[in-house]
Image (cartoon, coloured by chain):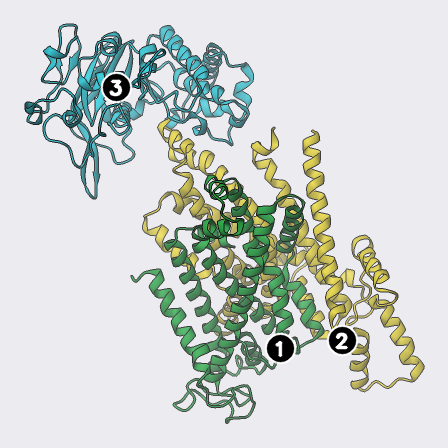
Chain colours: A yellow, B cyan, C green
Amino acid sequence: MARHARFLIGRLAGYVAVVLVGVTFIFIIPRLLPVNPVEAMLGRMMSQGAYMQEDQVTALREALSDAFGLNGTLLEQYFGFLRRVIFSQDFGPSLAMYPTPVRELIGQALPWTFGLLLCSVLIAWLVGNALGLVIGTMPNSRISKSLEAVAIVFYPIPYFILALVLSILFSYVWKVFPLTTTVRGAPWSWELLSSVVYHSFLPAASIIAVTFGWWMLSMRALSSTLMDEDFVVYARLKGLSRPRILLRYVLPNAMLPQVTYLALQLGLMFNGSIIAEIVFNYPGVGSLIYTAILQGDYNLLMGTVSLSIVAVATATLLVDLLYPLLDPRIRHR
Amino acid sequence: MIVVDNVVAGYRTPAGVVKAVDRISMEVRDGEILGIAGESGCGKTTLLKLLYGSFGDGLEIFSGRIYWRDPDGGRTIECADFHRHWWEIFSYVPQGSMSALNPLMRIAPQMLDAGSGGARVDKTARRERIAKTLAELDLPERTVRLYPHQLSGGMRQRVMIGLAAYVDPDVVLADEPTTALDVVVQRQILENLVRLQRARKNSIVIVSHDLGLHSQVADRVAVLYAGRLAEVGTADAVLRHPAHPYTRGLLDALPRLGDKQPRLGIEGRPPDFMDMPQGCRFHPRCSRAIEACGGVDPDPSTLADGRAAACIRLDEAVA
Amino acid sequence: MPSRLAIGIIIVGLIILVGPLAAFFAPDDPRIWQTHPRNLRPEVEHWLGTTALGQDTFWLLSWSVRNSLMLGVGVAALATIIGVGVGLLAGYRGGPLDRVLSFLMDALIVIPSLPLLILLSSMTKGQTSLLAVGTILVIFNWPFPARQIRAVALTMRERDFVNLAWFSGESVGRILWRQMVPYLRGWAVANFINTILVVVAIESSLAFLGLSNDNVPTIGTMIYWALKYQALIAGRWWWVLPPIISIILIFVGFFLLSNALADRMRINPMAAR
């Protein structure tokens, strides 16, 4: 049992450290720029015609500096920031949608992104692996070659291009899907659910199309190598049926590296979902980030970016912890 | 009993037809341990696959016939149908038992599912038999619940033997069962094999290049060279008084305790299947070759003590 | 059906022709606005028409492709050099140094780069120096080659032929170089190309969001400007489509190339990223 505890602690320590590194990045980057966000905001406000007296400007500058966490020495700011991110998750009020707290906005957007990502990742992973298993163990059929060709065409295309193309094709040229997301229906009614699915279809499709190719091609390589392994050859000599060999001998062994790869890919898939949400006006965290950019909403931006990093790190940790459950060689002795 | 009747078998490659087994006739008799010996590449693994009826890798029988005959009744099964009876009449111990087990499955399910192409298997009966067999092999009862990586090399090898034996088949085919094991474990494995066979009275076919192994366990030995049968007979006869020059050469090359001088190997190397010598395949390396050897590729001819050897200079050879 | 290698080479050749090479021959600086009449359809004088800002679309495209590729190649080269160096260090030295470096590599791989880049560029909207973007991309991309090299270096430590070379007096550096290079050739090419693609993708994504540098034309900024000026709604396809198609071609072409090259050198291209 001590071994398991050590493994867990090790992984958790790594997780905490990664989050710290990420959050430190978030802390450092804005401070590297010559632009002081407070002055920038004040400048913007003035140029938009607001007239304020000296002491009002000073008071505002104080308040904004406080809100941005820019008071005190660098070290004080750092720890203040850490405290806010990790313990209270309080990023202050959204500057564009004042006084709604950032936390609330994120809370509304999060389920959308979570749902989209979860479904897309699952579908891409499952379908990609299933197809990969099939073509890996039947290398020369025509289905294999055509699926491979499809994967090779889609896999290299960057997310936003595919999202853009899909958007152009299905929202402009053939007006099948709407340009914006307005969901109708009372919570959990059938109308609501089908409306959600309708609006989620394109963003999910763009993410799935680009990612499933990778899973399929890597699974194909894995399973075709496995077919030559001693224990698979012996399984055939034992007279086992092909489905059984694939399901109990090839697939579990191929899944292990695939789970590892999943952990590595989560960050990339998250990048993609941000773009997809923006292109399709999907009300998730990605769109929130975009809004924050357009409106110069510093608080919202810090909040969403911090969340992104923590979310991806957490998901990676979970997948990491999943691995020992699947590989008895790590669990026992 | 398995009968091999003048069989030519091999593979079609882009470079031509490779006859890995070229006109071999022999039998695997009921209740015997038969050893198949020879250097690497002599065709012994192909012969084993033929005996097992495993045609997966493009192996083809070009001519001749292989069939199994029931020791009790007269029913016969043709080689092409052997696979329907895997783990019922036939079973197999593969080379390299270290990696022949699925690392992600416990031992029990891997043993239970053998031969279950048809999927209707009596699990309870099998479990009992597995328990009994593993006990005979001196494996602790909890072995079935473990994963392969939790067993030592020797234990895994015994599991493979147990796997092949528990269904009580008529013929067990073993491919180099002791290669890559240390001597102590080798001995244990052999003892186990023999013990199981004595109890069940089935036949075992062991393919190995190790003549020492054959001398310990085999009842009869068949020596292959370049796809042809060089000599076959009782282990005692073949290994102590070899009739064929090749067998003699193999035995002469074995070191013994108390050797004062270096042992002589056999000059040259086995021929390429694409480039067979004319006549007797061994004659280019044979110390007793005469001119006539280049003209005739002899079939084994029977000697007085019941064994057969393929050499035209036999009468002089028997010591 | 021509081989993947052939198709890849043809596409990449086309890209290089239209992009970096062609940019040498542009008559005017395509970045300058109002050089030509606006919104012209494709014709003999302007092969892809002109934009709403009075730029010749074709030459703008060629400059954009050139800039995008330059950024990609530059970042890939730097990231690979750093990655190989760190990987060798970590793998061959081992010990606490390896532990620290490995942790750093894993951390940088887990953390998604796009949100950080968005954070950076949003502060300097439209004025982000490509140098800054490039630097961050190098920081987030060197771990990929580093991990691979480290893994190979670790096994190299134990390998017999390395020990043999060491005992016969060769220096560690030369050993590593001569023994590892043949092993890694195919993989290195695939990884290099993949990194170029990743950089082009991220820079284009940023530009598309309006976060890249408005003054330096890249494929992404071209799309951004086109959409900003309603090219889509106004049906001015000659401004919007060429950059999109050229990105697709860049990706598919380079990928086919890297795939075919990796196949030739018999390394699993999936392992590169």
Q: Secondary structure at mark 3?
A: helix
| Mark 2 and mark 1 on one chain | no
Local crowd at mark 1 within 10 Å, few (<14), some, or many (≥20)? Answer: many
Residue wearing tag 1: C213
Residue annotated with mark 2: A35
Residue drawn at 20 percent across, 32 percent down: B271
- Does C70 appear above or below B122? below
- The percent coordinates of residue C193 (x first, y second) are 48, 62
Element on which disc 1 rests: loop
* Residue at the right extreme of this rendering: A55
Disc 1 residue type? Asn
Residue placed most toward the observer, A191 or B141: B141
Say whether mark 3 and mark 1 are on the same chain: no
Residue placed under numbered mark 3 in the picture: B250
Coordinates of residue B15 in the picture (x, y in percent) = 19, 43
Describe the element under mark 2 as helix, strand or loop: loop
Image-quadrant location for residue B190:
top left
Q: Report how far apart the C-alphas of labels 2 and 1 lie in the structure.
A: 16 Å
- Which quarter of the rendering shows the N terminus of chain C? bottom left
Residue C200 in sight here: yes
Q: Chain of mark 3?
A: B
* Observer able to see residue A158: no
Q: Amino acid at mark 2?
A: Val
User: Which mark, by number, is residue A190?
Assistant: none
Residue at 54% x, 63% y: name it: A202
Q: Amino acid at mark 3?
A: Leu
